[in-house]
Amino acid sequence: MNACSDKTLLLHALVDNELDVASVASLRGHVAGCAGCAAELRELQAFKSLLADARVRHDPPPAWREWALSLVERNEARGRRRGFAPWIAGGSVAAVAASIALALLPPLATAPLPDELVAGQIRSLQAEHLLDVPTSDRHVVKPWFNGKVDFAPPVVDLAVRGFPLAGGRLDYIAGRTVAAIVYRRHAHIINLFVWPGQSPETPATIRRQGYSLIRWGRGGLSYWAVSDIDPNDLAAFQQQFAAATR
C-alpha cells in the first residue's frame, strides 16, 4: 500500500521536524485516516531510529583516507597536465574534496522522540530548570503559557489523587517549543510534555533508560508523561489526568 503522492515529501519533512505546527496538525489528521500514509510514516520513523543507532555506524579505515587524499592529488595533477583552466581544475578538485569530506563525516544522529523526552526529564532535574512558574495553583500555571506557545495546554490539579501540581515551564523537544506541566509523586517528578498533534487516545507505555513514558492524545494535542516512578503509578496519573480533561 503506497502513500499519497502529494504527501510523500511532507511525510519526510514531518519525520525530520521541518513542518510548522499547523502543517503538522493537518498532516497527522490526514495520516490518521489514510492507511498508506500511516504505513509510510511508520517506515520512515523506523528508518530514522535505525540511523540513530550507534551500532550501524561504520568508521572508514585509515587506509581509505590516504587513498581518498591521493585521489584528490591525482585529479589535481591530471587537470594541470591537460591544460584545464585553473578554475575548472579547482572546481573539480573542490567537488571531489567535498564528496570525500561528506563521506568522512560521521552520520548525523537524531535521537528518537522517546530518548529526547527522557533527556528533557533528566535535563530539567540536573540543570535546575524544572520550573519557570513554580506554583500549585493551576489558575496561575495555565494563563502563564498564554503567548509563549500557540496552543492552550490543559492544566489540572490532581493533588487529591496523589499527584500535586508543581508548576510549569517551556521545553524544546523534537525541534519545537512545548509545554511541560510538572507534577509530583512523593519524592518523584512527573514531566507532562504537551504540544499540538494527533496521537491515539489509547495510551501506550514504553521504557527508556530506566524511565517510564506514556503517550496519548486528545483534542488535537499530544501528551507524553515521563517519570522514574513505578509504571503503575504513572499509568494511574495518566488515567486521572485524562479523566479530568475530558
Image (tube, grey):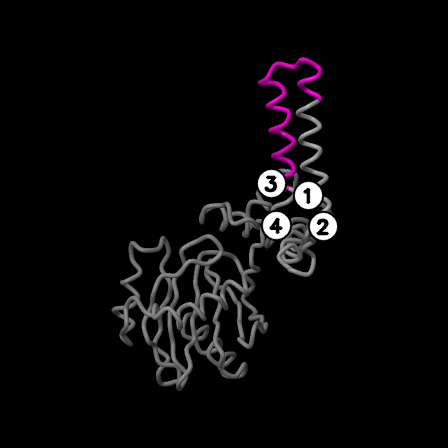
Q: Secondary structure at mark 2?
A: loop
Q: Secondary structure at mark 1?
A: helix
Q: Is tag 4's residue or tag 3's residue first in the polypeptide sequence?
A: 3
Q: Nearer the viewer, residue 140 or 61?
A: 61
Residue ID for mark 1: 65
Residue at point 41% right, 78% down?
189
Q: CA distance from mark 1 to mark 2?
A: 7 Å
Mark 4 in CB contact with mark 3 (< 8 angstroms): no
> Label 2 crowding class (10 Å Cα cut-off): few <14, some 14-19, many 20+?
few
Residue ID for mark 2: 61
Q: Is tag 3's residue or tag 2's residue first in the polypeptide sequence?
A: 3
Horizontally, residue 135 falls left or right of residue 176, namely left
Tell me the kind of residue under disc 3: Leu
Horizontally, residue 61 falls left or right of residue 125, namely right
Q: CA distance from mark 2 to mark 4?
A: 13 Å
Horizontally, residue 213 falls left or right of residue 51, namely left
Q: CA distance from mark 4 to mark 1?
A: 14 Å
Q: CA distance from mark 3 to mark 2?
A: 35 Å
Mark 3 in CB contact with mark 2 (< 8 angstroms): no
Residue at point 37% right, 80% down?
158
Q: Which mark is residue 9?
A: 3
Mark 1 in CB contact with mark 2 (< 8 angstroms): yes
Q: CA distance from mark 4 to mark 3?
A: 25 Å
Q: Is tag 1's residue or tag 3's residue first in the polypeptide sequence?
A: 3
Residue at point 71% right, 21% down?
78
Q: Which residues are magenta?
A: 78-102
Q: Nearer the viewer, mark 3 or mark 2?
A: 2
The question of residue 105 being in magenta is answered with no
